[in-house]
Image: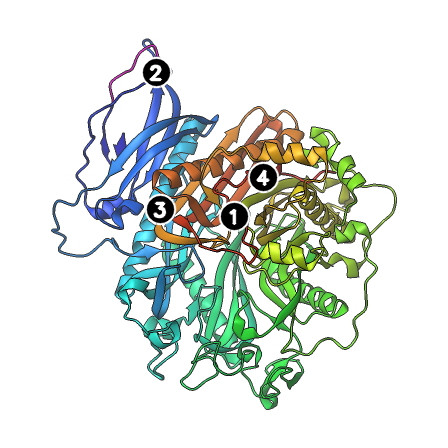
Amino acid sequence: VRLGPICYKTEIYRKSLHPQWNSEWFRFEMDDEALQDERLQLRVMDYDTYSANDAIGKVYIDLNPLLRATGCVLQGWLPIYDTLHGIRGEINVTVKVDLFSDANKYRVSSVGMRLFYSTRIPEGYTLISTLGFTEELIANDDPEFHWMDRIRTPRASNETRQSLFARLAGQLQRRVGLKALELGGNAVLGYQQYFDLEGDTGVVVRGIGSVVKLAKNQEISDVATAPASVQQPATSSAGGVVAGEDMAEYPFITMRHLPPGLIDCIGGIVSARSVKLLDNTVEQESETRDSWWTELRKEIRSHAKSLACNIVVGYQENTTICEDVLLLSASGTAALLATPGGPGAAGPDAGSRCGLCHAPYKPSAVPFRTQLSNCEQCQDGKVPDVLFATVEPSPAMGPISNAVLIQARVCEAKKDLKGEASAREISDNLPFLEYELHKQLLANMKKNGLNAVLGLNVQVAIGEHFVTGVATGTACVLDALPRPSSRRQANQSSYLSGSLSESEDDDMLSSSFKQRLCIMNHERSGRGDELTNAEICVTRQPPPGFTVSSTETCLGPAGLENQDDVDDADSVPHTQLVMQTFRVRLHQLYLPAGPLVTPQMPLVQQELSRLLNRGFQSLFVRLRKFRPCRVSGLHFRVACPQSDEMQVTMVGTVMYGDNASTTSSQAGSAKRRLHTRSSGVEVSTLSLIPGRSVSEYLGNVNFFLIREASNLTHSSYLNPFAATFLQEVVAIARCHVAAMGGDALLSFRMDHQLLLHGAHKHQGQYLVSIQGDAVLLEKVANAGSNGSVLSSEPPNLSSAETATSPPT
């Protein structure tokens, strides 16, 4: 039992695989700074008389949730996890924190500061003021590239990395909390944490968030509403933001659900990217990375000013690393802060309900090529012809209809260069890649009669021979914006639309396990059905009974069979996490061209689109028994971990009701099988669960886990290995939430995923970072218009349906 430098040992329990120590309390006297930084570690060993004890596994316990209030206790069965064998048992632990002295002369801890991964105002709280943007960065050496790693065992190396990353995450949260306290806040919303594994250069842990001041609803005097209770910058007196020095320097808000009365209108998406060359000879790594991100944030701020905006909402930062090249990306939605008397100052119920769609700039000073016209709703303000935004839908945008998932894919060729030459070529190609992505989105929107994309997210992956970009969002029709003049119905094939007949479903599911889970050596069919450039950007038309969106808010019943199904879907009581991850090898598309080996880019781009389409299809096949259902908060991550391979991950939440389709005997047996539930903790990418309300926020869950295997004798074993590990990750998260006294993990995210494969050594390594908010839910009385009864035991997807790869 270890906490920091202090270590205790239990007595040896002999001749039993079910030890019951019933030990006395192990007491650690530490200050609150160490409690925030360190993780309590339990290491279980198999005693050996004549040789070294064999390791069974370890348990890492985050003590930060116990510091939120006095008397908090963590008690429950926690999985014993080993980096080489996975979960190997469980141990019952009771942990509590007692404060016996308060003697800190200088405040170096952030005890009492609440960090929320949720991008909305927590339920049960009221936003008093938004104080600004906070960020922190910590750089450290990676134990994987230390000279000691040459003589360490794989288990010792992995556990050293896990311990270091856990300590860095704790230090990061403490420092972010200290900066928030300096701004006068008591919470950080939209907290985002990232691990940048830079190889032999080291590891960088970054954290950003929005500093706010919250108050519980019972602590607020009556009659006060959210817009009236918020404060405004020094230039105004109502609207939701207090402008401090940090807010003036970086006017960024990481929340995607905009509180009422915060902004007047939206200008559009702003983004900036920067390519840097990593150099392990440079000292002061933290200062160097800080300067890089400072340059990028200043560029985002200047872009927002060029759109006549003074704030960026839905702000996020990402990195992509390929060898010694680092790509920094930042994006958000430029907006105009609400002013007294403005359309947004009085909330969405007062005046126009289309104010967010109005352009913040005048027709005489349009910053880019666009067409302004009168608002279709109020005929007063000016609106653009299309609108892109990274935020969630808001009532102030007016009526929204015809929502559908849209995705653009682009591959740009890249020469096999190294060092500065590679960084320069990537930097030169990035503007053309983004231009092509937006060109595909615009063309496909106009073709389908859509005029807005909400919840837009752009992922850029860098490989040795190509740069890939994938833009995913929810396209819809905003009634305030003009509709495209000509709407041409595209004759999309069933392959592109994702619509599968029942016979095709059965054929796909009856394929062998190897064919379903492995597409590492995907053979291209010789039928010659090549995708055209216009078809590479796909507006997903799901089969009847499905609604798919990248936003948490369900914008419309696209694809549902009838209006009765729509009403039922609006009151869905069941939610379930859905994950798919798979790797594909594109080596068949590389042909020799002189001294270098370069890909045929049209074939690579078509193959990428085809594989992502098949991922959509497999998702619909696995969820067809739950129709009508909705898949919300669907996130895509694309990476190029090796030269000729691409990794794709899809994570979302499916919502369905008690009237899910069970027309056949096969469906009935599947329904009964799926109703077996191993845990009472729900995991969801959403910040709220329909039909439930959050009664208490218990803290957050933050893990970085590593899994390694040395028996992957064939590439077909790689995808099942990844699927099994992801299930173990979710199981560990569920157990920790249950030990904290919660029954749900909301705002679930997997930010860092890296699947490495050493084919010559039959080795595989998977690194995953997960975060989320642990909460205690309660049922909402009279939830749903149909009077459906909420079930306390929603079914759990089977192992083949939670994390797998699409069939070939």
Quadrant of the drawing holding the N terminus: top left
Label at residue 806: none
- Mark nearer the N terminus (3 vs 2): 2
Q: Amino acid at mark 3?
A: Leu
**Decide: marks 1, 3 in contact (CB < 8 A)?**
no
Quarter assignment of residue 385: bottom right
Q: Label 1 vs label 3: CA separation?
A: 44 Å
Q: State which region is magenta.
A: 10-16
Quarter assignment of residue 91: top left
Q: Label 2 vs label 4: CA separation?
A: 39 Å
Quarter assignment of residue 576: top right
Point 75% across, 57% down: residue: 536
Main secondary structure type of the part rendered in magenta? loop
Q: Amino acid at mark 1?
A: Val
Residue 317 visible: yes
Residue position for label 3: 168
Q: Residues within 10 Å of mark 2 (few under 14, many from 20)?
A: few
Where is residue 86? Give x, y as percent: 47, 28
Where is residue 192? Give x, y as percent: 43, 55
Point 33% across, 27% down: residue: 43
Residue position for label 2: 52
Residue position for label 1: 789
Q: Nearer the viewer, mark 1 or mark 2?
A: 1
**In terms of secondary structure, where does tag 3 sit?**
helix
Eyeballing the image, is 489 above or below 422? below
Q: Residues within 10 Å of mark 1 (few under 14, many from 20)?
A: some
- Mark nearer the N terminus (3 vs 4): 3
Label at residue 802: 4
Q: Amino acid at mark 2?
A: Ala
**Decide: marks 1, 2 in contact (CB < 8 A)?**
no
Where is residue 760? Give x, y as percent: 62, 28
